[in-house]
Image (cartoon, rainbow, N blue to C red):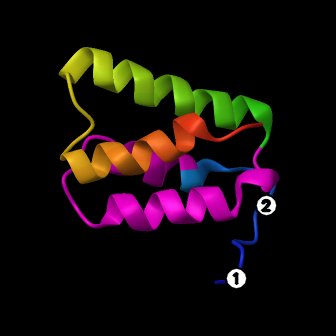
Amino acid sequence: MDKIQFSDSKVVLVCAFRYALGRRTYVVSTLVEEILNNWELLDNHTKNLMKREIVEHKELFGNLGMSCDEDEWKKILDKEG
């Protein structure tokens, strides 16, 4: 799959991330795949923001969606860099 062509702003990807976080839908796996496909294009602030929001969501709501969704979000938490 081709990489997303980013402008200076990662707003669309971050908005999609926030929309999908905690939802029980197939879009979680699709979005996580796209985030990881473009990981090297994200700045450290954006990477850390996503990781922090995943952890905060889990602490606040007790889950990240269904177990298959949690497995997907953990791929981002486990990603280096």
The reply to whether the magenta stretch includes residue 26 is yes
Residue 78 occupies which quadrant of the picture? Answer: top right
Disc 2 residue type (three-letter): Ser
Does residue 60 appear left or right of residue 19 in this picture?
left
Does residue 28 appear left or right of residue 47 in this picture?
left
Q: Which residue is drawn at 40% across and 51% down?
A: 72
Q: Which residue is drawn at 39% across and 19% down?
A: 56
Characterize the local packing of mark 2: few (<14), some (14-19) or many (20 or more) Cα atoms within 10 angstroms: few
In the image, the segment drawn in magenta is 14-42
The reply to whether the magenta stretch includes residue 17 is yes
Cβ atoms at labels 1 and 2 below 8 Å apart: no
| Residue 62 position within the rendered picture, expressed as x and y whole percent measured from the top left | 20, 22
Residue 30 occupies which quadrant of the picture? Answer: bottom left
Does residue 19 appear in the picture of this structure? Answer: no
What residue would you read off at disc 1?
2
* Separation (CA) of disc 1 from disc 2: 16 Å
Q: Which residue is drawn at 67% across and 36% down?
A: 46
**In the rendered image of this protein, does residue 1 appear above or below residue 16?**
below
Does residue 53 appear left or right of residue 48 in this picture?
left
SS for callout 1: loop
Residue 7, which numbered label?
Answer: 2
| Residue 27 position within the rendered picture, expressed as x and y whole percent measured from the top left | 33, 65
- Image quarter hosting the N terminus: bottom right
